[in-house]
Image (cartoon, helix red, strand yellow):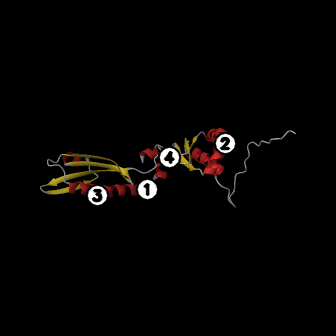
Amino acid sequence: MALRDAGAPITQDVAGVAMGLVTDGDEEIILTDILGVEDHYGEMDMKVKGTREGIAACQLYTKHPEGLSEQTLKEASSQARKAHEHILDHMQGQQAQCMPYHAPRVAEVQVERNGVRTLLRDRGAILRDIEERTVSKLWYDPRKQVVSVEAPNEEAEQRACKPVSEAVGDLELGVKVDPNVEEARQSFAVV
């Protein structure tokens, strides 16, 4: 959330949870979201970070003299996954609220094959023009078939994405199009 708030181009939410283990004789108690005291006196510290697609990083430290059993690790991992999903559920939908209006933005506009020629005609004149008018950076990524937009704020992002979409979009019956023509060129044949 902090990275989104700073305007970093995050494609998926990432969450983390710290798991702990305390024992009382033969009884093991796995704790979720441990505090410093639990970490200090506990026998395991396991930090799990990742997205909905899976774990991106895991760190495990144990003070248990015999090590940890496979069952204990399975239970801790299962409990961590549930906590992880719970945190991601709370984060979902908060992106727009946490990103301030003035934060830098990164966006992508999908470009169909027939729109590439339009955008890249005259060595990318359309993209350069949009860059100048919106103080944004635009480039075409042929692997993903998108125009990437780096804008200094939300307003510039919207002003940059709209003309790109209009330039490469197909015309549809009933859709209003901005008729603004900045320059018209005519060519005459001399006989």
Residue that badge 2 annotates:
121
Q: Which one is nearer the viewer's eye here, 123 or 56?
A: 123
Which of the two marks, 3 or 1, is nearer to us in this view?
A: 3
Which residue is identified by label 1?
92
> What residue sits 68% from the left and 39% below the top?
122
Q: CA distance from mark 1 to mark 2?
A: 40 Å
Disc 2 versus disc 4: nearer the observer: 2
Q: Amino acid type of disc 1?
A: Gln
Q: Amino acid at mark 3?
A: Ser
Indicate which disc residue 100 carries: 4
- Which percent across, then down, holds residue 101? 53, 46
Q: Nearer the viewer, residue 4 or 183?
A: 183
User: Is 75 situated above or below 5?
Assistant: below
Q: Nearer the viewer, mark 1 or mark 2?
A: 2
Instruction: Please report whichever mark, 2 or 4, sits nearer to the chain's N-terminal start.
Output: 4
Residue denoted by label 3: 78
- The foreground one among 53 and 157 is 53
